[in-house]
Image (cartoon, rainbow, N blue to C red):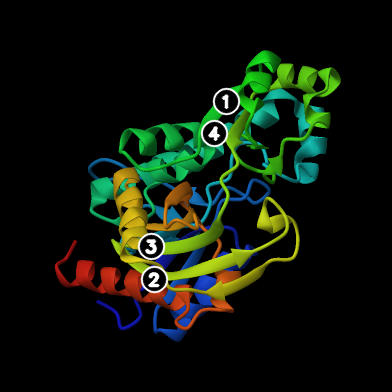
Amino acid sequence: MTSRPTIGIIGAGNERHCVYLADELRKQGAEPLIMDNTSTLPFPLTLGTGSGMPDSYYNDHSLKDVQVFYLRALYLPTPAFNAQPLEAQIRQEGYVAYAAQRERYAAWLSYLKCLPLQNKLLVNPIDRLLIHFAKPFQMAFLHREGIPVPATLVTSEAAQVKAFANGRDVVYKPVAGGAHCRKLSQEDLEPERLAALANAPVMFQQLVPGQEVRVFVLDGKVLGAFAIESSAIDYRTGEAAVTATEISAAVAKLSIRACRALGLLFSGVDVKLGSDGSAVLLECNPSPMFEGFDRHAEVSIVSQLASFLIQEAAARSAVGM
């Protein structure tokens, strides 16, 4: 065992949370390895399986002794936001360009799914990250577990939307994320707006009143909680006041229970707290942003996360996993 365990960070070399966590790992005596899976770089992975086959490599770095990984992002075969770097290639090569990106994604996905087979720790498991792109599944699963969630409808049918919105305030968001949550307005219920639903379904939810709180959970423990005040439906769209806050034992228990049910080691749990003490869970984020919250934290989320990753790496190295 070396004095500086290597911790893998899967994401992008210039993504701020990858860099933020890498800096903290160095401060705590570990060596971060940011494993960049963005689509515009030469493919960096070498995977070996079977007797006599080589170890897995990230570029020229052997991954044999890397025991713990943090999964910030596995980018989809086509970019979720800015596709400009690939537009020329896609125009020129068409399906061939898409197929190449799909192959890259499949290799990364295979590698990450193999880590548990090698008794290595991935925070969070790749299958758990994918629930971010299946928000209706998360709501249905948590509801089945008896955890309070908003009434939810996913549809492309105008009549269903009108019926759902009758007598209640409603918000809507993409099924797979990638855009902000907005309040459903009368203009949204006009025929020309509803006609756009034919192109793709949208996720509609009952607007839950109350105080919005982000609860960070790691390995069955609450790391910190933050109250969020914003005039916007989605606090990410404008100015928001964030303050560290105390939560009740019941809310902490609810957040931990939801994470355990979903198989999440680390999560940012979004909760709405009613004036009557009730709590409704909005979402368990499998790859939460925490840098902004750390500016208001008594003990930073990143320091606690880095410490956990290092401790896990040390424990696994000690037993020769």
Q: State the residue position of label 4.
A: 103
Neighbours of disc 3 within 10 Å: few (<14), some (14-19), many (20+): many
Q: Earlier in the sequence, mark 2 or mark 1?
A: 1
Q: State the residue position of label 3.
A: 217
Residue 313 visible to an observer of this rendering: yes
Disc count in the image?
4
Q: Secondary structure at mark 1?
A: strand
Residue at (64%, 23%) from the top-left corner? 201
**Amino acid identity at mark 1:** Val
Q: Earlier in the sequence, mark 3 or mark 4?
A: 4
**Residue 263 location, x and y as percent?**
32, 47
- The disc label shown at residue 154, or none: 1
CB under 8 Å between discs 3 and 4 = no
Q: Mark 2 and mark 1: span between their CA atoms? A: 33 Å
**Amino acid identity at mark 3:** Val
Neighbours of disc 2 within 10 Å: few (<14), some (14-19), many (20+): some
Q: State the residue position of label 2.
A: 223
Residue at (64%, 46%) from the top-left corner? 39
Quadrant (top left, top right, bottom left, bottom right) of the C terminus: bottom left
Residue 294 located left or right of residue 305? right
**Amino acid identity at mark 2:** Leu
Query: Of circles 4 and 2, which is in front?
Result: 2
